[in-house]
Amino acid sequence: CLGHNDPTVSDSLIEIGIVLYNRNNNGGALRIFKEALDIYKDSSNSDGVGRASNNIGCVYYKMGDIESALTYLQEALIAQRMVLGVSKKAENSLLNFALTQSNVGYLKVKLGHLDAVAKLEESLLVLESVLGDENLTVASVRSNIAIAKHNPSLVPLREDEDGLDAEGTVDTESE
């Protein structure tokens, strides 16, 4: 029987949080993601901390709290860096890191930070190698880089999406 603090429970909470996020239940998604984050932290699961922190950052962004979003995304990058090289799923770990790096770059563009383009370009290299050139996320990052290079203080990068990727189970085969 699984205990309340079992990391497997957190994996399920992440999936539930993503459903709530996609249904625009931001408060519910935030609560669920934070619950998952606490469990991941209690079990010293850096990969999970990275995933949950990235998703919390996405929710805060969607709620208009850019500073909190950036704080959680940067926390996610720290946790994800710890996983790189030691994970049995190296490709997924690298992909999650690149997606979070892309999210940080996106927010830095919105905030007018000068290092925004570099963050996006770094993530693009990994995303292209893992997901391929025809992937929608790759296309979105390319578009954001092009827009940022022309006007780094431009606020709305794309009207059809929020520009951030919540992380659940990454399936690199189907992309």
Image: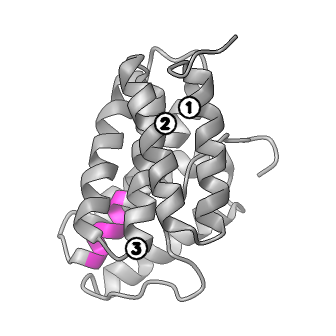
Magenta stretch, residue numbers = 104-110
- Estimate how packed mark 1 is, as few (under 14), some (14 to 19) or many (20 or more) residues with alpha carbons within 10 Å: many
Q: Eyeballing the image, is 173 above or below 111?
A: above
- Estimate how packed mark 2 is, as few (under 14), some (14 to 19) or many (20 or more) residues with alpha carbons within 10 Å: many
Q: Eyeballing the image, is 131 above or below 49?
A: below
Label 1 secondary element: helix
- Indicate left or right for 149 with 146 as reference: left
Give x and y (percent) for residue 12.
Answer: 66, 36
Q: Which residue is mark 2?
A: 36
Q: Amino acid at mark 3?
A: Met
Q: Amino acid at mark 2?
A: Ala
Question: Who's the residue at 58% across and 15% down the image?
Answer: 3
Q: Which residue is mark 3?
A: 63
Give the CA distance from mark 2 to mark 3. Answer: 19 Å
- Estimate how packed mark 3 is, as few (under 14), some (14 to 19) or many (20 or more) residues with alpha carbons within 10 Å: some
Q: Earlier in the sequence, mark 2 or mark 3?
A: 2
Q: Which residue is mark 1?
A: 10
Give the CA distance from mark 1 to mark 2. Answer: 5 Å
Give x and y (percent) for residue 123.
Answer: 44, 52
Asked whether 145 falls inside the magenta stretch, the response is no
Give x and y (percent) for residue 129.
Answer: 60, 44
Q: Quadrant of residue 76?
A: top left
Q: Mark 1 and 2 residues: CB-CB less than 8 Å, in contact?
A: yes
Foreground pick, 147 / 95: 95
Foreground pick, 23 / 82: 23
